[in-house]
Amino acid sequence: MDKESPNLLDWLSLGVDALIPLIIALIALLAKGYVDRLERNRASFMLAVSWRSEIFKELADNMNKIHRFYCYVGDWKTLDVKEVRIAKRRCDELVFSNHFLWSRDFLRKWQEFNDVAFMENQGIFVDFKFRCNVEMHKNNAHWSDSWEGQFVDEANRIKRSEFIPVSNDTMGMAAREIGVMPGRT
């Protein structure tokens, strides 16, 4: 019996049979690349979230120290002026060294917070002054008479009722912008 010579259909079938494993291998390579890219993006996102969370944690801790100092709540009597001065400077450092994380609105809010809480830019080599009531802080456990000059005079003091909303708004806005609190207005 004569064997029939292969026809076009046989050649096409053989070609398809040979191409199927190659196509599967190509799809697998593309899928692996996609999954690897997703994993790198996820890892990068998680690193950014962790970094932002650390920034917010430190900012919140230092702003809370300032808030307690101005509102006479919590352990405010154990805070000394040096601690709060360092906390303010650390907040400024966190805000300005990470300025690319913040919107212009937040940076304006941060300036408003500083204007309410501190008297700044009083001259070269003149440190900022606290705008809270020095008389309250004289009861502080660590009070030193040398600190009195680090507070503004009575005419420039801020009332707690003026400080609290600005402090709360600034902290809330920071939390939203850093991404640790859902956006609420």
Image: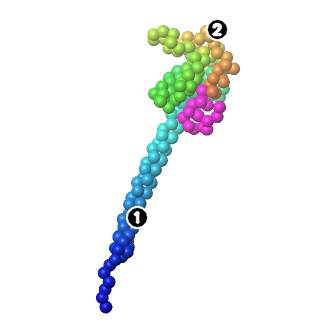
Q: Distance between the residues labelled 2 and 1?
A: 79 Å
Residue on which the image places disc 2: 155
- Secondary structure under the numbered disc 2 in the rendered image: helix
Quadrant of the drawing holding the N terminus: bottom left
For residue 176: magenta?
A: yes
Q: Residue 24 carries which label?
A: 1
Q: Visible in this render: residue 159? A: yes
Whether residue 72 sits left or right of residue 56 in the image: it is: right
* Residue toward you, 77 or 120: 120
State the image coordinates of residue 128 (x, y, percent, origin top left). 52, 15
State the image coordinates of residue 2 (x, y, percent, origin top left). 30, 88
* Residue toward you, 177 or 118: 177
The stretch of residues the image draws in magenta is 170-185
In which image quadrant can residue 71 be found? Answer: top right
Q: In the figure, 151 relative to 76: above or below? A: above
Q: Residue at x 53, y 14 (%)?
A: 120
Task: Give the crowd class for mark 2: few <14, some 14-19, many >=20 residues within 10 Å.
Answer: few
Q: Do the residues labelled 2 and 1 touch (CB within 8 Å)?
A: no
- Secondary structure under the numbered disc 1 in the rendered image: helix
Whether residue 113 sits left or right of residue 16 in the image: it is: right
Whether residue 124 sits left or right of residue 107 in the image: it is: left
Viewer-nearest of discs 2 and 1: 1
State the image coordinates of residue 153 (x, y, percent, origin top left). 61, 9
For residue 110: magenta?
A: no
Q: In the figure, 100 relative to 32: above or below? A: above
State the image coordinates of residue 105 (x, y, percent, origin top left). 56, 25
Q: What residue type is labelled 1?
A: Ile
Q: What residue type is labelled 2?
A: Ala
Q: Which residue is drawn at 63% across and 27% down?
A: 169
Whether residue 104 sits left or right of residue 168 in the image: it is: left
